[in-house]
Amino acid sequence: MNRETACEVYSRLLEHYPIVGERRHFIEFANPYEALIQTILSAQTTDRAVNAIHDDLFSRYPTPEALARAEPDEVEPIIHSIGFHHAKARYIVGTARKLVADFGGEVPRTMEELQTLPGVGRKTANIVLSHAFDINVGIAVDTHVRRVSKRIGFTNSTNPDIIERDLVALFPQKVWRDINYLLIRHGRAVCTAQNPKHDVCVVADLCRYYRVLQDQTELSEK
């Protein structure tokens, strides 16, 4: 897909899913520390589940220093409901300890430094940089971004690194945070994994996946 068509997709999605104020995130957080921990916890679970344990977790561990003093087995009961709680408890306690030991208790603001933290890969780092610091060095590729990007035709790959490369080549940097948010919104509401709602999709006429389905339907009717 060329940049002109990609930007038309972006414009239509933006009109359909208006962005109110500065909110382009789905997890609850009050500061970069909370954003980091919540994003680590959000892997392979829903934002609703992570948001449900927010108050309990951060009332007990309001700072990196407090969480660094905890043991993973003390944290596990609080996050048990989100799944993979054994590994995630180790990740967030380990991250808190590294924040205290290596970064003075502050969340780092670079991709390279963030990825030294336990449980933090490129996707998580992209999310934290964008949401907590308004720093856009890339586009986070989650399951919705991956699915919608490939269906529409932004990419031919299912590899998150390649998808991110293709997306940043199509869109100007100033909208990277927006396109991430819009693709997630569209993936949740319309372009779902099963039974996408083509009849209400505002970009169906620009979508490669929809065109292929239409061609297949026409062939079957001949």
Image (cartoon, helix red, strand yellow):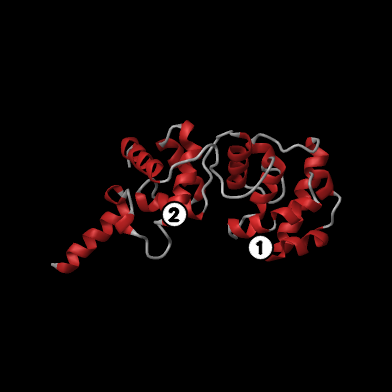
- Graded by Cα atoms within 10 Å as few (under 14), some (14 to 19) or many (20 or more), the crowding at tag 1 reads many
For marks 1 and 2, give the CA distance.
Answer: 22 Å
Q: Tell me what residue is drawn at x 30 percent, y 58 percent.
A: 199
Q: Tell me what residue is drawn at x 48 percent, y 39 percent.
A: 178
Q: Which mark is residue 82?
A: 1
- The answer to whether any part of residue 91 appears in the image is no
Instruction: Classify the position of the N terminus by image quarter.
Output: top left
Residue 86, x across and y down, in percent: 74, 63
Nearer the observer, 163 or 50: 50
Q: Tell me what residue is drawn at x 37 percent, y 53 percent.
A: 151
Residue 54, x across and y down, in percent: 70, 54
Instruction: Classify the position of the C terminus by image quarter.
Output: bottom left
Q: What amino acid type should be assigned to the residue bearing mark 2?
A: Gly
Toward the right, the furthest residue is 69
Q: Can you identify the residue that label 2 sits on?
A: 187
Residue 185, x across and y down, in percent: 46, 50
The image shows residue 124, relative to residue 103, as above or below, that is below
- Graded by Cα atoms within 10 Å as few (under 14), some (14 to 19) or many (20 or more), the crowding at tag 2 reads many
Q: Is residue 145 left or right of residue 58?
A: left
Residue 132, x across and y down, in percent: 63, 38
The image shows residue 163, relative to residue 41, as above or below, that is above
Q: Secondary structure at mark 2?
A: helix
Toward the left, the furthest residue is 222
- The answer to whether any part of residue 169 appears in the image is yes
